[in-house]
Image (cartoon, grey):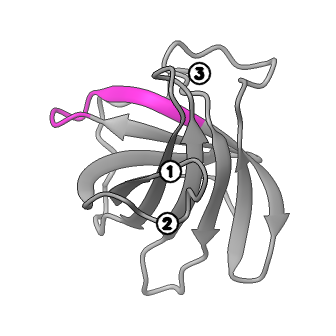
Amino acid sequence: MADFSICMTNRLQFSTCDAPHVPTSKTHEETVLVELRGDLLTITALGADSSPGSRVYAQRTIDLPETSIFMILPELPSRVRDGAFFPALGTVAILHPRPDKQRRLRAVGTDNNSGQCHGWIFDAIEIASSSNRPSEVTSGR
């Protein structure tokens, strides 16, 4: 999979840490910026004004014919400095699109950032647009 930078509509659901793949909340829609640079994937929450929020990092672990799998990182790689880093554990799958389709992202993760363990599920699809990356968004790396 080649490097990319795309906006996606994410259908976020929360879950428990005991079964992070099983949703326990209603769906919340949000926009995220998803960027792949080499083997490092970032998922950045975007505010209503396209301002960047917290950022999850993931490392590529497996490439399959139709999917690339990434491990969500609990710590930043030593070469990266980012004040928006959101430590978590989990898995991200990027489904390779056919030429006429948008990319799809599925992720399941957990985090302890609030002092308690929370689980969450991402189900995101690329926003169809010839220019879908907000110009004021930067990766912060």
Which mark is in front, 3 or 1?
1
Label 2 or label 3, whichever comes before in sequence order: 2
Q: Is residue 57 above or below residue 64?
A: above
Asked whether 29 or 132 is in front, the reply is 29
* Mark number displayed over residue 141: 3
Residue at which label 1 appears: 16
Classify the position of the C terminus by image quarter. top right
Q: Residues within 10 Å of mark 2 (few under 14, many from 20)?
A: some
Q: Which residues are magenta?
A: 47-56
Q: Secondary structure at mark 1?
A: loop
x, y (%) of residue 78? 81, 18
Q: Residue at x 69, y 82 (%)?
A: 66
User: Given the current orientation, which residue lies at the most extreme left position?
Assistant: 49
Per the image, is 48 magenta? yes
Q: Is residue 16 visible?
A: yes
**Mark with earlier residue (3, 1):** 1
For image coordinates 50% across by 31% down, the residue present is 55
